[in-house]
Image: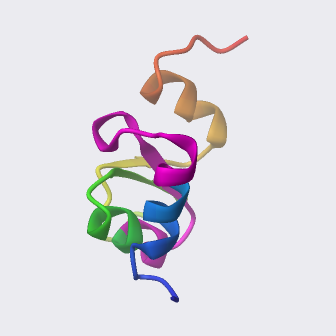
Amino acid sequence: ERKPSPSGNLYLMERHGLKREETLAVGDRELDVLAAKAAGITACLVSHEGSVTAADHRVSELEELYVLIGLEKE
């Protein structure tokens, strides 16, 4: 199914044994965020724009993800 269906996220979570509460979906479109939210997982939007989003987090550079996942930048 096409996004915003959660089927792709749910498939990957099942295949890799991921827990919803420990999964972070990262995407560059609002459709990615909506699919993650429909799957019941945390969503992060990579965007330089300040538009309204359903995402739980927003970053403008991928390096900012280190903080979200609890790693220090090398």
Asked if one can make out residue 54 in the rendered structure from this viewpoint, the answer is no
Q: Is residue 28 magenta?
A: yes
- Above or below residue 60? Residue 2 is below
Q: Residue at x 29, y 50 (%)?
A: 56
- Above or below residue 58? Residue 9 is below
Q: Does 74 sit left or right of 22 as displayed?
A: right
Q: Residue at x 64, y 41 (%)?
A: 62
Q: Position of residue 55 (x, y in %)?
A: 32, 58
Q: Residue furthest right?
A: 74
Q: Is residue 73 magenta?
A: no
Q: Residue at x 40, y 82 (%)?
A: 5
Q: Position of residue 42 (x, y in %)?
A: 33, 48
- Above or below residue 66? Residue 50 is below
Asked if one can make out residue 11 in the rendered structure from this viewpoint, the answer is yes
Viewer-proximal residue among 34 and 23: 23
| Quadrant, the C terminus | top right
Viewer-proximal residue among 13 and 21: 13
- Above or below residue 46? Residue 71 is above
Q: How many marks?
A: 0
Q: Residue at x 64, y 32 (%)?
A: 63
> Coloring scheme of the render?
rainbow
Q: Position of residue 4 (x, y in %)?
A: 41, 82
Q: Does 28 sit left or right of 7 as displayed?
A: right
What range of the chain is rendered magenta? 13-33
Q: Position of residue 46 (x, y in %)?
A: 54, 55
Q: Residue furthest bottom?
A: 2
Viewer-proximal residue among 5 and 64: 5
